[in-house]
Image (spheres, helix red, strand yellow):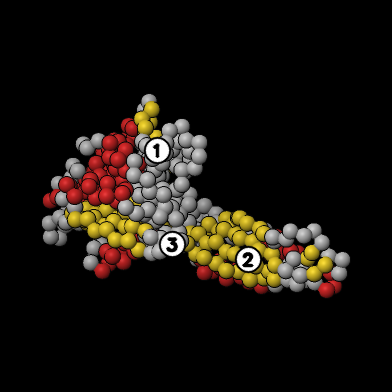
Amino acid sequence: MTDASLLAEKLIAAPSVTPATGAVFDVLEGMLVPLGFEVHRFVRGEAPDGPVENLFAIRPGPAGSRHFAFAGHLDVVPPGEGWTSAPFAPERRGDLLYGRGAVDMKGAIAAMVAAVADIPAEAGTISFIVTGDEEGPAVYGTRALIDFMEERGHRPDLCLVGEPTSVNRLGDMMKIGRRGSVNIWLEVDGTQGHVAYPHNADNPIPKLVAILAELDALVLDEGTEWFQPSNLEITDLEVGNPAHNVIPAKATARISIRFNDRHTGASLSEKVAGIAAKHGGTALPIISGEPFLTPPGEFSQMIADAVEAETGLVPEASTSGGTSDARFLRAVCPVIEFGLCNATMHKRDEAVALADLDTLGRIYARIAAAALGKR
């Protein structure tokens, strides 16, 4: 099998802080074209959320064959300071490969490429759905790729997203769904005035505190069969009042809700807006994803069988953690996430076990072969 670690080094060496364009996509295209893939690249959006580059690559199989898609992203979060070695100069130390994106998720993309190198074209259609905008606002990334695919009639039968889902050992967890996410900005207007003359002012802070207290006391649910309980967190609180003797004119806060399939982003936004209005405030929601579930079945069993064959582990089917672009791809076909251990993702000195890269490539090859052979 193609050495996945060498491919990962090439991808890591191309800086791609979100939103990503350019060199890192050149590297991936250079890997896929020799394997017979038709590579389509396009850029969407403008600053501040763009420009974003996207890549859709496809290797058509025989007429009527099944279509299996690998999906992921080449953008990474900013590396920050204090790395032992340069974050975009991949370095092997002992059994580990260091570099930003080693785990999340250039390593997985490298394993995908290594996997398809050993799958003959006559086995079926394989595609890559890769964006440069997963770590950012995700406005001009996977959603634009889905539009591109629909315009050209490309609809996979199954899709595997290579997010780092493993926890303690490669293969111990896959994600069969994700909770939804909504962020809501709260605002209460008042009337500015001198603190010694409160009758001439209207202090917005007590009203905002009342809103937050009621929201913090909410018990949204107790969880469901496949989802943990929904949770609401207060993530920001601001008045911006530099003077000690002035009643402010405005107070704002922000909350974040991660929710299961008992709710929708709209229903939670409506609930929060009602509580805010009761205390004289307003609520502005931004829904970044709805909950989804790919129920355990043939697809999850294919993944479990492949993982067990290579590692001896049976992966736990979970919906824990944050959101991913699977929330968009689930509208296209059944989607499951499986990838590397996530202990160092987004951290300084991000690193992946070299052995895990090769093992993941073999797992991905087994999954793709099973998916294409399933009638």
Residue 62 percent across, percent down from the top left: 12, 56
Q: Earlier in the sequence, mark 3 or mark 2?
A: 3
Q: Identify the disc placed on residue 141.
A: none
Residue situated in front as seen by the camera: 368 or 276: 276
Quadrant hosting residue 306:
top left
Q: Which residue is mark 2?
A: 186
Image spot of residue 1 (x, y percent): 21, 36
**Image quadrant where residue 359 sits:** top left
- Disc ID at residue 99: 1
CA gap, disc 3 and disc 2: 26 Å
| 234 with respect to 357 (left or right) | right
User: Element at badge 3?
Assistant: loop
Mark 2 vs mark 1: in front? 1
Q: Is residue 135 above or below residue 171?
A: below
**Mark 1 vs 3, N-terminal side:** 3
In this rendering, the answer to whether 317 lies above or below 3 is below
- The percent coordinates of residue 185 (x first, y second) are 59, 64
x 60%, y 59%: residue: 255
| Residue picked out by circle 3 | 47
Three-letter amino acid code of the residue under disc 2: Leu
Of the numbered discs 2 and 1, the one sitting upstream in the chain is 1
Q: Is residue 63 visible?
A: yes
